[in-house]
Image (cartoon, helix red, strand yellow):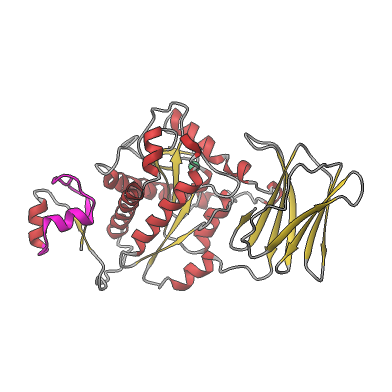
Amino acid sequence: MWTAPDHTRVVLDLDGQVDHRLFRLKDPDRVVVDLEGVENEADAKGLDLPDPVLDAVRTGQPESDTLRVVMDLRQEVKPKTFQLEAHGRHGHRLVIDLYREEGGEHPVAEARERTRADEVLVAVDAGHGGEDPGAIGPGGVQEKDVVLEIAKRVAKKLDEKPGIRTFLVRDGDYFVELEERTKMAREANADLFLSVHADAFHNPDAQGASVYALSRKGASDEAAAWLARSENKADLAGGVDLGQVDEVVASVLLDLSQTATISDSLDLGTGILDQLDGLTRLHSDEVGQAPFRVLKSPDVPSLLIEAGFISNREEARRLQSGQYQKRIARAVANGSSRFLKERDMRPTVASGEGSAIEYTVQEGDTLWSIAEQHQTSVSTIKEANDLQGSTVLVGKVLEIP
Ligand SMILES: [Zn+2]
């Protein structure tokens, strides 16, 4: 069971395709699913249900070969079901989506509401979620959990910068379809779309962070192609009613716009890699390209950021540490901020009280000269930016408290 902002998803794991019938009962509100020729092996009684919709799940047998699943509800819902074929480690599934009459605050509406006309909006997307765990690392650590933490930190870092607002495409453990993610960014009028992931590879030695933009032709290399295939499978694991997916309309105009958008995405990606360099190991110092479905907005510069290899024992450990997550977040936020400034997309806002000034390191600068210029100390700058040594690279964005 997974709770999303506007619906609750209940998934039944099955041995194969089933005939089922769904109906609603009133006073009290219930949704009932009858499954033909099914025997129950699960115990619904022990289910922990901290959910705004589901109060309890009960099972019974109204006839000898029918399993009845009764969902007691806390509020009225619009239910919808669909079946999913077996895929990867998932067997056959029956998905029951319970849509609330009054959904929670939708992130898109909320984001538009609190973004001023002169502010830029960045959509921060945590990959996977719900029944799609993404890649799984040593000790069972799941990509969906790690990337949600990092995405939240990226959003927080960006929100601290004057003139930038963010919204999280998902802020909990539930699945959002790939196409829906880009749709949300476009509906919110987002200026950038950043999707946070963690890599996995069959070679456990693979390591380092990397950044990808969309390619409409092939992939930049074999590893990028492999990665795009595995990331694009999310919809199969996460459960998408394929009858519902609209194909993006292809047109010449869309094509032209996308070419410019990809070029912007590559610049943004290079800027983020520059900021990551020195803070963490890089898997590649160039922005990779592959046909990632989640990056297909024709008009919003979009990047996929692989924060490290969750399949690598040491990196799996680091990806779970707050310190490493913060570092990645800082680099992504600083790179984005610099890109937006260069494009004049950010208003020149005076820093608010308590917010930091951003300074881009110039040729000939030393930490000491930067500190003196801003009437602060080297140790203050080092601490604010997590700097280990005393050297800084030209182009690096520093926060000066
Ligand atoms: Zn992923």
Q: Is residue 267 left or right of residue 301?
A: left
Q: Position of residue 157 (x, y in %)?
A: 34, 59
Q: Position of residue 85 (x, y in %)?
A: 71, 39
Q: Is residue 226 left or right of residue 96?
A: left
Residue 377 located within the stretch drawn in magenta? yes
User: If the image is split into quadrants, where does the C terminus sit?
Assistant: bottom left
- Residue drawn where x is 62% and y is 68% of the image: 103
Residue 398, by quadrant, is bottom left
Nearer to us in this view, 398 or 118: 398
Nearer to us in this view, 305 or 207: 207
Residue 49, by quadrant, is bottom right
Q: Is residue 173 left or right of residue 275?
A: right
Q: Position of residue 180 (x, y in %)?
A: 57, 54
Q: Is residue 39 left or right of residue 198?
A: right
Q: Residue furthest right?
A: 63
What secondary structure do most residues of the magenta stretch adopt?
Answer: loop
- Residue drawn where x is 41% and y is 33% of the image: 312
Q: Is residue 301 visible?
A: no
Nearer to us in this view, 390 or 342: 390
Q: Is residue 243 visible?
A: yes
Residue 183, by quadrant, is bottom right
Q: Position of residue 99 (x, y in %)?
A: 68, 62
Residue 4 located within the stretch drawn in magenta? no
Point out the stretch of residues depicted in magenta: 374-398
